Image: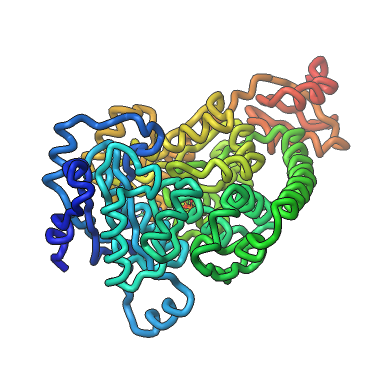
Amino acid sequence: MNTADTRGSARHGHEAEDAFREAITVGDGVNATDASREAQATGGDRYEDPNNVPDQGEMELAERHALRRVQGLSTELTDVTEVEYRSLRLERVVLIGVWTRGTQAEADNSLVELAALSETAGALVLEGLTQRRSKPDPATYVGKGKAAELHDIVESTGADTVICDGELTPGQLRQLEDVVKVKVIDRTALILDIFAQHARSSEGKAQVELAQLNYLLPRLRGWGDSLSRQAGGSGGGSGGGVGLRGPGETKIETDRRRINDKMAKLRRQLVHMRTAREVKRDVRRTREVPSVAIAGYTNAGKSSLLNRLTGAGVLVENALFATLDPTVRQARTPDGRGFTLSDTVGFVRHLPHELVEAFRSTLEEVADSDLIVHVVDGSHPDPESQISAVRSVFADIDAVDVPELIVVNKVDAADPDVLRALRTRYPDMVEVSARTGKGVPDLVEALAGALPELAHEVRALVPYSRGDLVARVYEEGRILSEEHTAEGTALHAFVPELLAAKLNEYAPSAV
Ligand SMILES: Nc1nc2c(ncn2[C@@H]2O[C@H](COP(=O)(O)OP(=O)(O)OP(=O)(O)O)[C@@H](O)[C@H]2O)c(=O)[nH]1
Ligand SMILES: [Mg+2]
């Protein structure tokens, strides 16, 4: 379709003065399936500082790019049965982003990511549009004239939902809906929806539902009056479509107090679940086996890497947020030292704060670990922006003191220039491909080297009745020598503190 230019120049009289700073970009015909997802990039942090007005030159340049289509955004359907299947349960969506700063490429990349998120949620992406503005319109997010254009696009494509690339106020959602006449959801609701679909454990489901209710509460009034929203299934079902799964309209109709009651109940349940998980973790702690958390941007290949390292059989999917429930696996260094490796939920730019709050206890496992393996998608055009998004979550959950090992994955598909830039920036990084296995031995070595030091060197003669202690030295320590004598096992080893104290009972005069 090449109607972009005509759409772009269709200015509305009342906003003529805004004309130069409102350039709407229209995207279509783009495939946000595998190819573009692999090519996706992350844009700048566009909503963090709405007062940061880009300079005039940038804006003028933007004007020249008016009505640029963002390529690669619409869902490609490969066969007819897929079309039928999707039309039953998927929504047809138009994406819209307000681009306040950064480059055109960043703005486009951000919309590509939004398309990937939308598809992960099960939507069919018809168009992607960005508008250049100094800040989002306080009433309708995009400017009034552009909202009217958006309405025309929605009508001509037959879309039933508009997804905005930001967090909108309840008022903005309602007013934009009034103009475009279809359901409008924002990035936060979209991410919550994906989490609702993917949560498996009861803790994960409770966390997501709490986050959804928290999001819903201030929006109760704005939603559901002018448009008839489908009722969502309760508790993370799949009934309501994008943005409406989970609490859904049944809850909208109930009063705030019931929602608050429900939230209080969920919080209580979560405290119990958390206690159970902490007990398990404490058991691991007393064994003094170091814990390594695999963290990183969503789709970076964390689960693939865990599988590669341990053969764990963890779900790998080219979808965002495939993993929501932490998986813990046992692993061993080449010299036999045991440690745990845990897979975690992926991070994303502007992770809704409701979710960071809800997932705090899960994320705290990252903060409590002895080492963070920060997996980076080397095949992404702009991995640095993903690294900084992930690090800002580390800061949120107080994980900044945990040693971090940067592991650049997907080197088989990475651009050599991108890798070169990363190497300069992170000289200690390890390069791997979970797919081909390349670099994995280096990673294992780097991991072994980065585990906390075994500070205690002990010599002990452990009686054969205490075979359990010898087993623990195998598990938690590093054995330098071992000899079976008449009185017991003579050991010379490096071990962690608690174990050293126990072994000292059998040391050292006899050795
Ligand atoms: N080319 C290439 N693709 C990879 C590699 N590692 C993983 N992938 C692909 O990247 C996609 C995401 O992999 P996952 O392991 O699910 O990523 P994740 O980080 O666990 O993702 P979430 O759990 O969704 O946050 C899948 O399609 C993998 O097949 C690699 O080394 N090279
Ligand atoms: Mg995963």
Q: Nearer the viewer, residue 40 or 190?
A: 190
Q: Nearer the viewer, residue 509 or 326?
A: 326
Asked where in the image residue 161 lies, by quadrant, the reply is bottom left
Could you tell me residue 482's position as x and y percent?
69, 31
Residue shown at 26%/53% (left/top)?
145
**Of residues 429 and 98, which is closer to you in this image?**
98
In the image, farthest residue toward the front: 14
Q: Pick the residue in front: 248 or 301.
A: 248
* Residue ID at (64%, 32%): 368
Can you give x and y, in whole percent of width and height, for residue 317 in the image? 46, 61
- Extreme residue in the right direction: 465
Please, is residue 230 above or below residue 435 in the view? below
Residue 151 figure quarter: bottom left
User: Can residue 173 be seen by looking at this rendering?
Assistant: yes
Q: Residue at x 66, y 28 (%)?
A: 481
In the rendered image, the quadrant that contains the C terminus is: top right
Q: Is residue 338 visible?
A: no
In this picture, residue 404 sits left or right of residue 504: left
Q: How is the image coloured?
A: rainbow
Q: Is residue 375 left or right of residue 196?
A: left
Query: Which quadrant is the N terminus positioned in?
Result: bottom left
**Residue 18 quadrant:** top left
Give the residue furthest to the top.
Answer: 509
Percent position (x, y) of residue 348? 45, 45
Quick check: 117 left or right of 425?
A: right
- Which residue sits at x=14%, y=32%? 57
Q: How many marks?
A: 0
